[in-house]
Amino acid sequence: MSELTGLPALPTRADAAVYRILDANLDRAREGLRVIEEWCRFGLNNSAQTEQLKHLRQTLAQWHTPELRLCRDTPGDPGTTLTHPQEAERTSITAVLQANFCRVQEALRALEEYGKLYRDDLAAGAKAMRYQVYALESEILGAHRLQRLRQGLTYLVTSPNDRLLPIVEAALQGGISLVQYRDKDTDDHLRLDLAQRLKDLCHRYGALFLINDRVDLALAVEADGVHLGQTDLPIATARQLLSSQRIIGRSTTNPDEMQRAIAEGADYIGVGPVYSTPTKPDKAAAGLDYVRYAAEHATVPWYAIGGINTENLSDVLQAGAERVAIVRAIIEAENPTLIAQYFAAQTNHRHSFHAVAAPVG
């Protein structure tokens, strides 16, 4: 307070700069939290997470004092004219959530550091809040991906093809829900580039994108997850590397492998090969009996896979499958969109039938 006027003393130039930084980052953190909160409320219908995010916003609002707001100088802020091409487009809900989690975390870090020059409680509170937001990020993004996994009934597993990108896009246009990039032999730098383009393509159509075997490639392109074979990394190790945000699937060929994969924490499993397939030349067909076993015993989403095509799909569905993974029937099709539409229509019909037939209570 000024002893002469009784009014608050004007901040020094350095203080004013700190106040502007705090004001801007309080705004940024509150805005980002609101974006995430809206998805928890309307997209996930999760009241607990919605309430937690609302509480975080209100806590920030208590620190957003008039003395900070009075130092705001929007016309003189050079940052208002800065932008980046990635900010102009969001390809999926996941991208929206990820961008806003990053925005909140960066703002909280700035509040923690500059808050030390202003109020100790603000600095300490911002630090504690940042760790809460890290935990929420894992919970919400993981839940969002798992929700889409449960809803996804048709799964395209790729094989090397000179026209892979247009084939995958055609399949996505036909309703494919998940895409797994599978390529055992191409050089890594080429695989990395193609994986990035495939992920961007899948997210543009709202589909999940997973990579076969390679946790490192999945991390490099920020894929939605990985699919592991029986001889690949243990699920616990992959989970440690990928965190709970991302999906981990496991191939299984018999009931013992299924139960082990579920016990180890697989988010979904592949069930097959249902029929003999050149994709798995060393694997004998598991047959429809294994599909029937999965229908009765699997406690996670599962995809029948292996030699499934338009001619035998009805047998697979009648054996109890609701989800199917397809390779050659789409990759080698003259019209991948039409074939994908057929698989999507048949699995949707089967899924709807099971939902209606399910007992109540």
Image (cartoon, grey):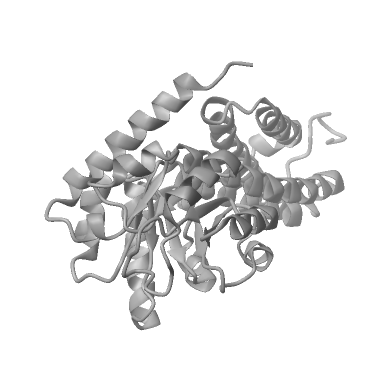
Does 191 sit left or right of 239 as displayed? left
Q: Report x, y in % for residue 280.
A: 39, 70
How many numbered badges does the structure rendering display?
0
Task: Between residue 267 and residue 282, name the one nearer to us.
Answer: 282
Q: Residue 181's image quarter?
A: bottom left
Task: Between residue 287 and residue 170, name the one nearer to us.
Answer: 287
Q: Report x, y in % for residue 226.
A: 51, 62
Residue at image x 37%, y 31%? 350
Residue at image x 35%, y 32%? 348
Residue at image x 57%, y 52%? 102
Query: Which quadrant, please, contains the N terminus?
Result: top right
Taking the image as drawn, is residue 284 in sight? yes
- Of all residues, the one furthest to the bottom in this rendering is 187
Q: Report x, y in % for residue 346.
A: 30, 35
Task: Between residue 264 and residue 176, name the one nearer to us.
Answer: 264
Q: Residue 156's image quarter?
A: bottom left
- Of all residues, the one furthest to the left in this rendering is 334
Residue at image x 74%, y 57%? 113
Q: Residue 209's image quarter?
A: bottom left
Q: Is residue 153 above or below residue 84?
A: above
Query: Which quadrant, please, contains the C terminus?
Result: top right
Q: Report x, y in % for residue 217.
A: 47, 71
Task: Between residue 196 and residue 185, name the one nearer to us.
Answer: 185
Taking the image as drawn, is residue 77 in sight? no
Does 295 sit left or right of 280 as displayed? right
Q: Is residue 308 above or below residue 242?
A: above
